[in-house]
Image (tube, coloured by chain):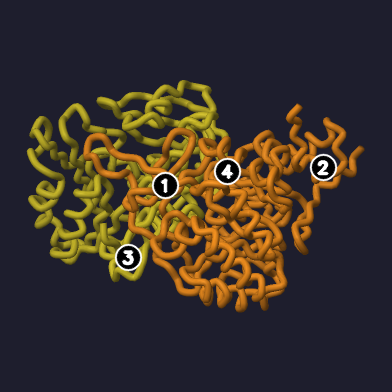
Amino acid sequence: MIIENSKVISNIEIANNIFLLTVRSPQIASHGKAGQFCNIKVSNSNYPLLRRPFSICDINNDEVSFLFNIVGEGTKILSGKKENDVINILGPLGNGFLLNDDFDLAVFVAGGLGIAPFPLLQKELKNKKQIERFFGARTAAEIITLDFEESHWATDDGSLGRRGTVLDLLDSEINNFTNYKLKIFGCGPTPMLKALQKYSEEKKIKCEISVESAMACGFGICQGCPVEKNDKSGFYLICKDGPVFNSSDVIL
Amino acid sequence: MNNIDLSVSIGKLKLKNPVLLASGTVGYGNEISKFIDLSKIGAIVTKSISLKPRKGNPPQRIVETSSGMLNAIGLANVGLEVFVKEKLPFLEELKTTLICNIAASSIEEYVQCIRILSEHEIIKAFEINVSCPNVKDGGLIFGNNIEAVKKITSEVRKATEKTLLIKLSPNTADIWKFAEAAKNEGADAVSAINTLVGAAFDIKTKKPKIKNITGGLSGPAIKPVALAKVFEIHRNVDIPIIGIGGISNTEDAIEFLIAGASAVQLGTINFINPNAGIEIIEGLKNYCLQNNVNNISKLTGSYNLS
């Protein structure tokens, strides 16, 4: 865990209201793993007061990138950052995806901004595992292509790819992968993750999900980001015990 | 003049400087120790410990507000037994001055916790949380009731020789009367203030933004309130005050000392800048140098009302 003042390399609106921020953070870049996140202070003032958590989207040498959309004041300020602006970043935080367990086909399932951690995950799995990508968005205007190779797409309005949810899309293709040991990696809005939990349980497919939450510190001291344990005995902290969980371990 | 004395004494407690890290913002030391050298801090105050573990509240537990945040964590903690077995050994390694914050739902529970923890040499003082706004049992019920504060203080006083701090609620009229009650029953100091009760609603769903509906407001937004409370206690009661409330930098800390605090605790800022404590200690040293203050305790209550 490092606090690094990071210079903005670029901040580009790559789809409707969706930005890709790239910063120079050599230390965070050298330690970050797919599925981890950083907690970013978007201003030097008390407004907004708290840092904002963002998944690490990709790492290239000493550069780290983050994908975000404008949802409130914090992300609005972040969207205005220009080349050479300096941003204070705390990270890398959280556990990241588990990659050394027993599977030979990684199935990415993302909804909307949930696509964020997958460019780095793709990089880490390259030449080690096969990958199938299933991505969903509301409309074609919100499609985030990034550097993905061939992917399956679904949109709510059918403006690109299959009309429907990413889960419908996954289900329509899943029988093509019966010869593989599958592992699903999921990230997206909570309703999608809930559906994915149910789906992976029914199909008995190993599944890890990346969960999000508002949080203050990002490293376990504020206790502000609980997610209930499956046995209801208490809570995990999303920042420290997650944000990636075995899908059957948590109740969303 | 290089030998500035930053040390302060509160009861039997000797602190190398007046900068403490507040309960609930440092956990039990291990996570934040990756960012800050806790051996250089005046003291750390643990997350509230209760006799039995507490799961805490379901999400949403926190929400940001203007220059502040609301939290309703619900005193989530590992419980006394696990604290002693698993957390104390690490805290011993940190070589920091340790103050244990205790939360309980009955006077007997407070006393029992203190009796058990008093046996541990490493714990130098207790801070009694009589004012958590986010749990149904205990908490505010005690913090709002002067007779309860008296009773808790006197019973806890009998149970330990160690320095005793009573953490006061601002959600009450005449905070100084609570400070006076604590003093009369043998407390060595008061910590002021705990969080203010607050709420926030989503205008689309019309739901409260935190599950508990109300939460404790902290951060820079509450600093003026906290300063007024510290000042009120200082003017009316002769008891050391540990000032808490939105302190984010050196200037804030100095304001609290001037208003009457002998020491300060940093809270919400630890979530944003976990090294703030060290920066503020350095800042206090520089302020003393520049203003010919050879002993930081001279700043306490040095307000000029003329």
Colour-to-chain, orange:
B
Q: Crowding near pointer 2: few (<14 within 10 Å), some, many (20+)?
A: few
Q: Which mark is residue A229?
A: 3
> Which tag is nearer the camera, tag 2 or tag 1?
2
Residue pictured at 72% horizontal, 72% vertical:
B161
Query: Is A110 situated left or right of A35 in this image?
Result: left
Q: Which mark is residue B285?
A: none
Question: Which residue is label 4 attached to?
Answer: B245
Q: Amino acid at mark 2?
A: Lys
Please identify the quarter of the rendering in which residue B294 is found. top right
Q: CA distance from mark 4 to mark 1?
A: 20 Å
> Which tag is nearer the camera, tag 4 or tag 3?
4
Colour for chain A in the figure: yellow
Q: Are tags 4 and 1 found on a single chain?
A: no
Question: Which residue is label 1 attached to?
Answer: A215
> Which tag is nearer the camera, tag 4 or tag 1?
4
Please identify the quarter of the rendering in which residue A100 is found. bottom left
Q: Nearer the viewer, residue A114 or B130?
A: B130
The answer to whether one can see residue B120 in this image is yes
Q: CA distance from mark 3 to mark 2?
A: 51 Å
Marks 3 & 2, CB-CB < 8 Å contact: no
Q: Which mark is residue B298?
A: 2
Q: Position of residue A75 (x, y in %)?
A: 38, 31
